[in-house]
Amino acid sequence: MVKKAGVLGATGSVGQRFILLLAEHPDFELHVLGASPRSAGKQYKDAVQWKQTDLLPENAQKIIVSECKAEAFKDCDIVFSGLDADYAGPIEKEFVEAGLVVVSNAKNYRREPGVPLIVPIVNSEHLSVIERKLAVAKAEGKSKPGYIICISNCSTAGLVAPLKPLIDAFGPIDALTATTLQAISGAGFSPGVPGMDVLDNIIPYIGGEEEKLEWESKKILGNLTKDGTDFAPLSNDEMKVSAQCNRVAVIDGHTECISFRFAKHPAPSVAQVKKVLSEYVCEATKLGCHSAPKQTIHVLEQQDRPQPRLDRNRDNGYGVSVGRIREDAVLDFKMVVLSHNTIIGAAGAGVLIAEILKAKDMI
Ligand SMILES: NC(=O)C1=CN([C@@H]2O[C@H](COP(=O)(O)OP(=O)(O)OC[C@H]3O[C@@H](n4cnc5c(N)ncnc54)[C@H](OP(=O)(O)O)[C@@H]3O)[C@@H](O)[C@H]2O)C=CC1
Ligand SMILES: N[C@@H](CC(=O)OP(=O)(O)O)C(=O)O
């Protein structure tokens, strides 16, 4: 059965991606769109400043934008949030308390106990915390409770994608450095990055970003607590992470130059690393989810790849590209990772999570 979807923050950079990804989706239909009071009451086509290279889908154009109040979304089976983090906190809380399922791109609840922080091609098994909650409510004869699932920071998504299969195959990584080259779509549209700042330039600072990479990677690559009700992020002793983040004049696609060391030695060979990455199949693909990448990680052999313009749309933006895999003189390995920041780093991750929830009968 097709599920009714709501989108909060539908007019923004992430919200517009949700519209594109959901407009012709076989499992979901656009039901309610929400944005700020400035946009509410207008037809979506008049409220939005459409900035995508694909045309605004016809079935979204005439939807009247709602205020972000749970009452307006009460018939939705799932609500995707691309809200500005300054406003997401109380709005998403109200939705969950009203019994709604929220999949959010905003940072507000990522560190909250019991809230899964998901990169769907990496740690979908962390959704078991919610499955458990739903099973307990059912066993107690209660109605399905609302819940929130957080999508990670967009550069964190690219960072952890190749690390997960490597940790599964070769054991823990105890030291990791990442230098990012992040696209301007990551900064959103209101106000966004001015052309005068970014053209012919690189900005070596993105507020709060380095801390997010350093913390979120530890929750995503960490474990569940023994009772399965919460998360046990890796400690700094288990995995030290150091990130440096830069904004570059690319529209979509975050590039990251990463180096890392395995805790156990001798380390694997470059050929073993490439084999594990190429053979990795994420759970969403195994479940047959509509948007799941055919190839989760693309290992590129050309010496000048990945490149954002050429590689960001692999597997429709749901796949991650990794190139220049080689030994590192300081840590064990270095490589370049590219991921589409508004697809697998944001809206696409939300859609893929929803497909997994549907496949597991959680919505
Ligand atoms: N861009 C990216 O690559 C990524 C973004 N994120 C996160 O996703 C979220 C959205 O980011 P992004 O799309 O870039 O941001 P934008 O600034 O482009 O969009 C923000 C959205 O929030 C809405 N909004 C603003 N104020 C209010 C309000 N008072 N009440 C209700 N809605 C409001 C806006 O509506 P209106 O048009 O009416 O003002 C707009 O729809 C953020 O939390 C961001 O940190 C996460 C990962 C990646
Ligand atoms: N900060 C990211 C996008 C983003 O909004 O991330 P977060 O959801 O973690 O705040 C970027 O600028 O590319």
Image (cartoon, grey):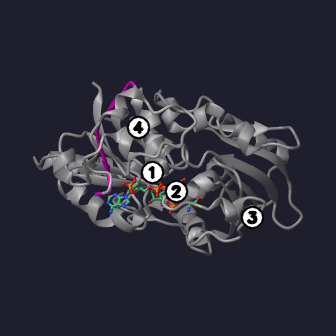
Q: Residue 45 versus residue 358: which sits nearer the camera?
A: 45
Q: Can residue 263 be seen in this view?
A: no
Label 3: which secondary element: loop
Is 239 situated left or right of 50 in this image? right
Which sits earlier in the primary sequence, circle 3 or circle 2?
A: 2
Residue position marked by numbered label 2 in the rendering: 188
Query: Counting other residues with Cα less than 10 Å from the Cα at mark 4, is it few (<14), some (14-19), or many (20 or more)?
Result: many
Position of residue 210 relative to residue 255, above or below, is below
Q: Which amino acid does label 1 sit on?
A: Gly
Q: What element carries label 2?
A: loop
Q: Name the residue under label 1.
A: 12
Identify the residue shown where x is 44% and y is 54%. Answer: 105
In the rendered structure, find residue 55 and report the number of the disc placed on it: none
Q: Distance between the residues labelled 1 and 3?
A: 24 Å
SS at mark 4 in the image:
helix
Q: Marks 2/4: CA distance? A: 27 Å
Looking at mark 2, is its residue's CB closer than 8 Å to ligand 1?
A: yes
**Label 1 near ligand 1 (CB < 8 Å):** yes
Secondary structure mostly seen in the magenta stretch: strand
Residue name at image x 57 percent, y 56 percent: 186
Q: Nearer the viewer, mark 3 or mark 4?
A: 3
Residue 31 falls inside the magenta stretch: yes
As measured in the structure, the alpha-carbon distance from the residue carrying label 3 to the one carrying label 2 is: 17 Å
Spatial separation of the CA atoms under disc 1 and disc 4: 25 Å
Can residue 310 be seen here? The reply is yes
Number of residues whose C-alpha sits closer than 10 Å to that of mark 2, classed few (under 14), some (14–19) or many (20 or more): some
Q: What residue is drawn where x is 41% and y is 52%?
A: 82
Question: Mark 1 against mark 4, which lies toward the viewer?
Answer: 1
Distance from Cα at disc 3 to Cα at disc 4: 38 Å
Which residue in the protein does label 4 denote? Answer: 356
